Image (cartoon, rainbow, N blue to C red):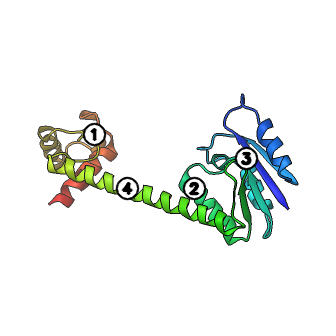
Amino acid sequence: MKIGYARVSTDDQHLHLQIDGLRKAGCDRIYEEKASGRSLERPQLAECLKALRAGDTLCVWRLDRLGRSLSNLVQVVNDLQREGIIFESLTEKIETSSAAGALVFHVFGALAEFERALIKERTHAGLAAARARGRKGGRPAKLSAAQWKAVQSLLRAKELTVTEIAQQFGISRSALYCTIKRTQTAK
């Protein structure tokens, strides 16, 4: 069975072009969805994937209609292949039933992995460069060094509750406890 999946991102877009192409390609059933590609909530896609069985073909108008990103698309297609389901994209003329189509998808997968590795390397290099310039990551401290000393004095005196101390310095109890914990682990 050949099952189609058509998706547009907004309500003012139309599915006509995709549906016509999927019908022309011989789809027996077409799942239609109006949802952003970035959205995790795509119930029609979930239903479509549930309906597929080994030997079936999932057909889309274009690659970007199926996945939220290249890596997500590769993951979905790899999952389909493991289940014995063929994938076909009409616009790009890719189908995973042939060796050439499978090769294209493996190349996409390698490119997605390479892209993730580059992003990771750049992030680590940027953090190292920032640390070398004396910058620390994370949020700025809620309390200055002088305020922290005053908080420590109040905590030792045990005259005020943690809630009262936190209110006095305009921070939450959890922020105060985090600061206490961070100071204790630093020692």
Task: Name the disc covering residue 108, or none.
Answer: none
* Sequence-earlier tag: 2 or 1: 2
Residue 10 picture location, percent across and down? 68, 33
**Is residue 144 shown above or below 187?**
above
Residue count near mark 2 (Cα–Cα under 10 Å), binned few <14, some 14–19, many ≥20: some
Q: Residues within 10 Å of mark 4 (few under 14, many from 20)?
A: few
Q: Secondary structure at mark 4?
A: helix
Q: How many marks?
A: 4
Residue beneath the point at 62% across and 51% down: 67
Q: Which mark is residue 166?
A: 1
Looking at numbered disc 3 in the image, what kind of residue is underneath it? Trp
Under mark 2, the amino acid is Asn
Disc 2 target residue: 72
Question: Between disc 1 and disc 4, whose residue precedes?
Answer: 4
Q: Amino acid at mark 4?
A: Leu
Give the label on residue 61, or none: 3
Q: CA distance from mark 2 to mark 4?
A: 17 Å
User: Who comes first in sequence, dot 3 or dot 4?
Assistant: 3
Q: Nearer the viewer, mark 3 or mark 1?
A: 3
| Image quadrant in which you'd find residue 184 | bottom left
Tag 4 residue: 118
Q: SS of the residue at dot 3?
A: loop
Neighbour tally class for label 1: few under 14, some 14-19, many 20 plus, Cα within 10 Å? some
Out of 157 and 12, give the one closest to the viewer: 12
Q: Amino acid at mark 1?
A: Ala
Closer-to-camera residue (46/161): 46
In the rendered image, residue 105, in percent from the top left (x then y), is placed at: 60, 62
Please tell me which residue is depicted at 55% across the width and 59% down the height of the picture. Answer: 108
Left or right: where 69 falls relative to 60: left
